[in-house]
């Protein structure tokens, strides 16, 4: 039966006179020779063309490599004290100098990256997944279920973070898992609201209806069409979640949850350096610089992704 | 015009169909319903093009979308090839989806901007698992693109790189991917340049001739459908008020609303044009939330009588024509 149809189609002679012809010059200007075939392959190709985004991605990758392997190859450990050289300025032996206990700041920054980056990325990832699924579900199906689920979100959101923190600490004790839990318990709410609003407005679009008429199932329509078309706001929200998690972690460390002395994260290093800000301002620079460069890189990556993922914005 | 209609083979049968929307604003407001489609019945035959005409907002899209199960009907039945489609699920629904396709009005909104043309046309093939390999699908996409007058190397481009007419061709290629038996064309040309409209119409006719497809062709303007339709139904405020052979309806509209619609069309022959009684449509289309009692057209009808406000005129046969109007009823009795 399929063959018959194919044959019939082939028989249809395209009557050239009927069709709009493109000018030859127009053809060339519009047609960019590409090997990539799908939307995501195209997006990756275009992402690589964006210099700032590529630099940001390289920086983050370097940071991750340093976090994982740096401390292993360093002659010092994060808690090794050298009381003979306290508060040293940067030198060949200690590229970033030492702190008030004579600990090498460079190795502590690399070690701190482990905590800060894993908390930042892991919580952003968890919030992203929960937020997109929850918000997408509410926006797509709507109705009474959506109303109930969104009220629930409001309740979750209205409880002060400190209360969650106390609860989590009581139940799970003070460790990195508690930190993640405390950040994620209400962290996905913003994402869920964003995605819900996007999906609600996009689901009436004719391409979504067209997918339904074709026989696409709900999850295909939701994730292949609606979520993909909401990717702009999703990326922006995700990029904001990473630094906010890094700061929350340092706040939690400050009130005694998560890592404890002498372990290091960028947040705890910054708050330790605060006491010496008048005499040793350089000690403050390193963790803050690490946080800032990470945020900057993430923003570049976010912008690059946003552009690369929108075919209309590609050059 | 294709003439190979099989009159005794009914592809689509719509019976007393109603689609109402809830338009209640707020939690405690008075309940309001939009009667977008209000008691509509008709049949479409195999190989036929059935034109559906009416002003914007009269419920044409809602009718079409109810038929393809985007909306659930409030009452009445829809039969495709003799099978009632209410409540079908799973595989049955999927095979129904394969047989019936829909071309949307807005070629800028009906293609996902974040998919290549190839991905767009392959999507229905993937959903229904028609082909096993990417190569087979690519071959089919190229062939479909040629069929609709595009180039196979357009496969890697994005919708925004095309003109409105070309996008509508992409849309058509996508619907053809499933080898449908019935296509609802929801004002497929009204968003396009006049110069391109004829091309798309020709393409649709050509496809119909080759593949024996039936069309429900929706338009807001009689002139757009008269050439390609075998029969035409005129819709007003959720109801069909006149239904008949295309040529007859066009040359001799009986319902006052059809006459008014035709007067709005520029008449090609100036002599004939003068002979015709010209009715201008006065006022606005009433709200479907609070439609007039009795005949829906009575607020704008120059012939409205007392009776028209009291009861709703029913569709009556006059030869091969069906009209719902008391004036026509009286004149022909
Ligand atoms: N999803 C919907 N919810 C509520 N009202 C709707 C919906 N879709 C259409 N309507 C209303 O139904 C009426 C008919 O609309 P539509 O079928 O789009 O008309 P047409 O296609 O003839 O222009 C309009 O008054 C419109 O506002
Ligand atoms: S039924 Fe009455 S109001 Fe309606 S179209 Fe006929 S004459 Fe006019
Ligand atoms: Mg419409």
Image (cartoon, coloured by chain):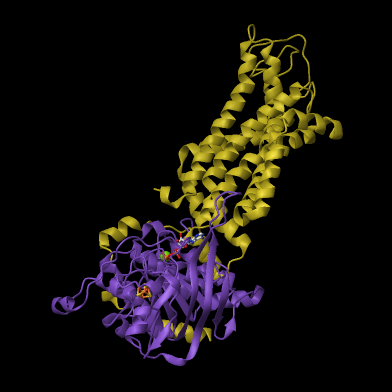
Chain colours: A yellow, B purple
Q: In front: A24, or A13?
A: A13
Q: Residue furthest top?
A: A279
Q: Quadrant of residue A60?
A: top right
Total numbered circles: 0
| Residue A98 visible in image | no
Q: Residue A58 versus residue A13: which sits nearer the camera?
A: A13
**Which one is nearer the viewer's eye here, B65 or B235?**
B235
Q: Position of residue A314 (x, y in %)?
A: 42, 48
In this picture, residue A29 sits left or right of residue B134: left
- The image shows residue A248 at horizontal and vertical percentages of 69, 28
At horizontal 63% and vertical 60% (from top left) the residue drawn is: A219
A70, above or below A46, in the image = above
Left/right of residue A80 with respect to residue A224 in the rendered view: right
Q: Is residue A269 above or below residue A176?
A: above
In this rendering, position of residue B311 left or right of residue A190: left
Residue B44 seen from this side: yes
At x 45%, y 80%, the residue is B314
Image-quadrant location for residue A67: top right
Measured as percent of width and height from the top left, residue B191 is found at 34, 63
Q: Which residue is situated farthest in the front direction here?
A: B306
* Res A122 → quadrant: top right
**From the viewer's perspective, is residue B297 above or below residue A225?**
below
In what quadrant does ligand 2 lie?
bottom left
Between A247 and B87, the one lying in front of the other is: B87
Give coordinates of residue A178: x percent, y percent: 79, 34
């Amino acid at each position: 039966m399929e063959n018959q149809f194919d044959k019939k189609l082939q028989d249809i002679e395209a009557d050239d006179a009927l069709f709009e012809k493109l000018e030859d010059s127009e053809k060339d200007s519009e047609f960019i020779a590409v090997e990539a075939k799908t939307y995501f392959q195209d997006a990756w190709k275009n992402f690589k063309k964006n210099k700032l985004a590529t630099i940001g991605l390289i920086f983050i990758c370097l940071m991750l490599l340093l976090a994982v392997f740096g401390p292993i190859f360093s002659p010092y450990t994060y808690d090794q004290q050298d009381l003979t050289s306290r508060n040293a300025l940067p030198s060949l032996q200690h590229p970033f100098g030492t702190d008030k206990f004579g600990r090498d700041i460079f190795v502590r920054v690399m070690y701190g990256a482990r905590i800060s980056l894993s908390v930042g990325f892991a919580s952003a990832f968890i919030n992203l997944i929960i937020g997109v699924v929850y918000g997408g579900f509410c926006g797509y199906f709507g109705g009474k279920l959506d109303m109930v689920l969104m009220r629930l979100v409001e309740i979750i959101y209205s409880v002060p973070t400190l209360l969650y923190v106390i609860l989590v600490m009581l139940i799970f004790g003070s460790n990195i898992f508690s930190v993640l839990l405390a950040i994620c318990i209400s962290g996905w709410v913003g994402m869920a609201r964003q995605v819900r609003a996007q999906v609600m407005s996009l689901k009436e679009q004719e391409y979504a209806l067209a997918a339904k008429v074709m026989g696409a199932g709900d999850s295909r329509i939701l994730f292949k069409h609606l979520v993909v078309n909401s990717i702009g706001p999703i990326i922006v929200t995700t990029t904001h979640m990473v630094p906010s998690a890094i700061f929350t972690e340092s706040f939690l460390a400050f009130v005694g949850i998560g890592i404890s002395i002498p372990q290091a994260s960028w947040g705890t290093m910054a708050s330790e350096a605060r006491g010496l800000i008048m005499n040793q301002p350089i000690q403050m620079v390193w963790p803050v610089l690490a946080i800032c460069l990470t945020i900057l890189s993430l923003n570049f990556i976010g912008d690059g992704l946003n552009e690369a993922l929108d075919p209309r914005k590609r050059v | 015009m294709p003439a190979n209609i099989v009159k005794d083979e009914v592809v689509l049968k719509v019976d007393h169909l109603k689609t109402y929307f809830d338009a209640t604003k707020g939690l405690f407001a008075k309940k309001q319903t939009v009667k977008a489609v209000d008691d509509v019945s008709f049949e479409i035959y195999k190989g036929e093009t059935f034109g559906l005409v009416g002003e914007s907002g009269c419920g044409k899209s809602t009718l079409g979308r109810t038929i393809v199960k985007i909306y659930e009907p409030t009452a009445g039945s829809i039969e495709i090839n003799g099978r009632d489609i209410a409540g079908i699920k799973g595989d049955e629904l999927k095979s129904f989806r394969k047989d019936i396709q829909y071309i949307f009005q807005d070629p800028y909104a009906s293609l996902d901007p974040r998919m290549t043309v190839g991905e767009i046309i392959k999507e229905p093939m993937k959903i229904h698992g028609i082909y096993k390999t990417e190569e087979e699908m690519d071959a089919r996409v190229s062939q479909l693109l040629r069929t609709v007058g595009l180039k196979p190397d357009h496969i890697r481009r994005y919708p925004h790189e095309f003109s409105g007419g070309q996008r509508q061709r992409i849309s058509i290629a996508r619907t053809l991917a499933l080898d449908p038996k019935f296509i609802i064309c929801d004002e497929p040309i009204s968003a396009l340049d006049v110069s391109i409209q004829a091309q798309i119409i020709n393409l649709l006719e050509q496809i119909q001739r080759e593949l024996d497809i039936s069309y429900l062709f929706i338009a807001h303007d009689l002139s757009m459908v008269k050439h390609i339709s075998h029969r035409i139904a005129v819709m007003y405020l959720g109801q069909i008020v006149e239904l008949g052979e295309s040529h007859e309806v066009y040359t001799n509209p009986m319902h006052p609303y059809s006459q008014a619609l035709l007067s709005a069309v520029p008449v090609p022959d100036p002599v004939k044009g003068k002979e015709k009684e010209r009715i201008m449509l006065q006022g606005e289309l009433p709200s479907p939330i609070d439609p007039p009692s009795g005949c829906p057209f009575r607020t704008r009808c120059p012939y409205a009588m007392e009776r028209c406000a009291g009861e709703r005129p029913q569709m009556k046969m006059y030869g091969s024509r069906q009209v719902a109007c008391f004036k026509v009823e009286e004149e022909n009795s």
